[in-house]
Amino acid sequence: MLLATGIALTALLIWQADSQEFLTSLLMAKPEWLVAAFTLQLLTVTMISWQWKLLGHHIHSGCRFHQMVHINMSGTFFESVTPAMKTGGEVVKAYLLKRAFGWTTVQSVALVGLQKVVSIGPLLFLVGVSLSLYLLTNGISTPQGWLVATSGMILLPVFLLICAVFIAPAGLAVWLEKVFPAKWVHTLSQSLHSLENALSQVKKRGNLGRHFLLSVTLWFLFPAKAAIIALSMGLEADLINIATVTFLAYMVAMIPLTPGGLGTFEATVVFLLLPLEIAMHQSMAFAIILRLVTFWLPFLISALYLLAHWGLGHARVPARTPSP
């Protein structure tokens, strides 16, 4: 129902724009540029799986790249259909890590947390810069400025919690044990202690900076894809504005309303591009193509991958001999 709501919201936005001009704007995008953007998306998926493999070695040396590809494909599918700031996908990843390597729940949750720490840290910085630039340019009194500031305030507690996890996970575990009954936070507390050990291992080996650099590269690939699409459509907006709007729309879409921020991301892109005097049909076409590259195609690929994996798994199961 929530997925249908997101699709309906997107359809409503398209209906609000001039359908003929919207279609014209879609067709203006050059196919070769779109192929380049999708190639960057495939590179992003590959690099994320590689990052998971590298981080997994700090907990268990037996992690293999193809296993992390499978786990991330599964996570991509489930985070695309659950409206929970990607936590639906992270729960699936923790479960599959436990199954694939025979880890405890504590170890699996620790790796998921470790990847989130090195990934969200750079994102917080980039979103903060984007938020500041947009408010300085357009002001907080405008409807766009109000939306950006309000969304930032809603997500601020989550960002602060992530910072606490990064700075002192063991300290956060001690605090949780004091505030909540032990049986409620036992597994989470153990996972936070395990996360601190994993972070210590990464720091000792001098790899923390490399992982942050890799995450920064991954996050910059997101506005790079948006810039390629904007250039292919001939949008009259500089790359800094495109990058700022892209990060801010991602931030708003993190508020758990629809699966994968479906509808809310597109609406935010259109809304934030209004002060740049870009026509609604152009901004809507830009948002739809960007989501096609970064959301719908990865979702479709992950769904087909899981379907093929499930089919092959059943094909390998020998048929039972009927009882005499």
Image (cartoon, rainbow, N blue to C red):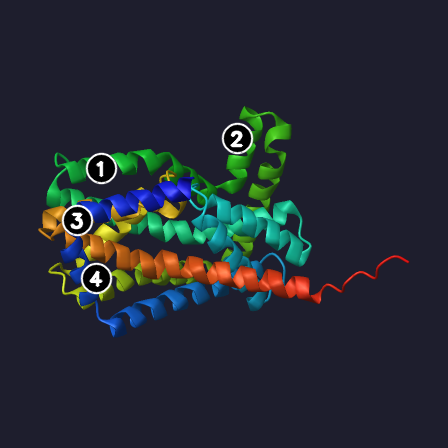
The disc, 1 or 3, on the residue closer to the chain's N-terminal end is 3
> x, y percentage for residue 290?
28, 58
Q: CA distance from mark 1 to mark 3?
A: 21 Å
Instruction: Identify which residue is drawn at 31% across, 71% down.
Output: 35
Q: CA distance from mark 1 to mark 2?
A: 33 Å
Question: Is mark 4 in CB contact (under 8 Å) with mark 3?
Answer: no
Q: Position of residue 211 (x, y in %)?
A: 44, 60
- Disc 2 crowd, CA 10 A, few/some/many (<14, 14-19, 20+): few
Identify the residue shown where x is 15% and y is 56%.
20
Instruction: State which quarter of the image contains the N terminus.
Output: top left
Q: Write down the residue under mark 2.
A: 175
Rendered image: mark on residue 26: 4
Which residue position holds label 3? Answer: 17
- Separation (CA) of disc 4 from disc 3: 12 Å
4 or 2: tag closer to the N-terminus = 4
Residue 134 lies, with reference to residue 32, above or below; the image says above
Query: Residue at 40% across / 63% down in the picture?
Result: 214
Q: Is residue 166 above or below residue 231?
A: above
Residue under numbered circle 1:
147
Assign a secondary structure to mark 3: loop
Nearest to N terminus: mark 2 or mark 3: 3
Q: Amino acid at mark 2?
A: Trp
Q: Earlier in the sequence, mark 4 or mark 3?
A: 3
